[in-house]
Amino acid sequence: MKKFSKLAIMGGALALLLSFGFVSCSDSGSDDSPDTSKSAVETKATAKTYSFAGGTNGVVLADLDGWDMATKDVISSPVASTATEKTLSNGAVLHWKGAKVGTFRFRSTHDANASLTEEIANAATALNYNGGLTDGDLLSGVDLSTVDRYVEISVDGAGTVTATVDFKGAKESDNPTGGPFKAAFVDKDGTVLGTVASDEVTASSKDVTITGSVSAAGSVYLVFSRNGAKKGSSGTGGLDVKTIAVTPAE
């Protein structure tokens, strides 16, 4: 009996020591330590400005290789019977499809059929959507496969995208119908990311701001809809894009 009592005492002491050890391990992993896991840290977008004029982060001569110079003061995209894309030197991507030249046009100053030069490229002031989605108010989003022209940029984290644009309307004397014009940023699924900017068919408003918010890395697309605007039986209206800027989340 005496031997059994000693063993019991030793076992109890061992259990007590182990219990202290477990408490110590638990304390070292307390919830007071910051969560530094990758999922807990928001990745913020890198700040960048894409210009669609000549100059810093803007259009260069190589971007316009093969474009059409037949029309005064615009440099027109070539015919694209199938969906086509062109990555500019600043990283922005133009997507278009059209049976005629000029689905997209860069505005610059030159005579019709002038030779394209670096000086003319540097003089570009904006990218013109010479038309857009025929119908649709964009408020409920859009199927990108139905849009025949749009600009894509990539963001590498959370932030805000902002476009500065001019709406280009018809003259009141043309008696246009339909509209108003619509423009917005959407994601790859066509979901609107922020505000839908709007303008009347007879307006040619300048420096309109379009914004969208992104929560993670991905692509965003700037789309424009004439929203049924017509001049007689033909669609009317366009959009001039000057810049798209990315601002990191705060």
Image: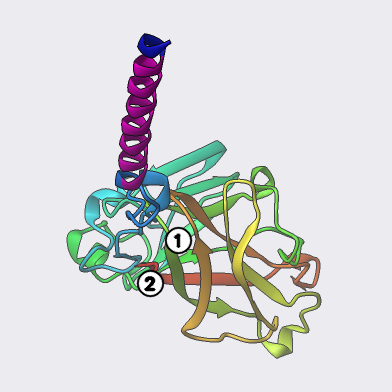
Q: Is residue 191 left or right of residue 22?
A: right
Residue at image location 70% in from the left, 58% down from the top = 141
- Residue 102 in sight here: no
Q: Is residue 206 magenta?
A: no
Q: Label the magenta part by its dominant secondary structure.
A: helix
Q: Is residue 149 above or below residue 6?
A: below
Where does residue 196 sit, x and y in percent of width and height? 64, 72
Where does residue 191 sit, x and y in percent of width and height? 65, 55
Q: Is residue 170 left or right of residue 115?
A: right
The residue sitting at the front extreme is 2
Q: Is residue 174 above or below residue 156?
A: below
Residue on which the image places disc 2: 250
Q: Is residue 179 left or right of residue 123?
A: right
- The amino acid beneath tag 2 is Glu
Q: Name the residue nearer the viewer: 126 or 182.
A: 182
Where does residue 149 sit, x and y in percent of width and height? 56, 52
Residue at image location 53% in from the left, 74% down from the top = 210
The residue sitting at the bottom extreme is 172
Q: Quadrant of residue 76?
A: bottom left
Secondary structure state at the residue bearing disc 1: strand
Residue at image location 32% in from the left, 49% down from the top = 36
Which callout, 2 or 1, points to the residue nearer the camera?
A: 2
Residue on which the image places disc 1: 105
What whole-number distance in Å separates the C-alpha atoms at marks 2 and 1? 35 Å
Q: Quadrant of residue 158?
A: bottom left
Q: Name the residue nearer the viewer: 5 or 110.
A: 5
Residue at image location 24% in from the left, 49% down from the top = 62
The quadrant of the rendering that contains the N terminus is top left
- The amino acid beneath tag 1 is Arg
Q: Which residues are magenta?
A: 5-27
Secondary structure state at the residue bearing disc 2: loop
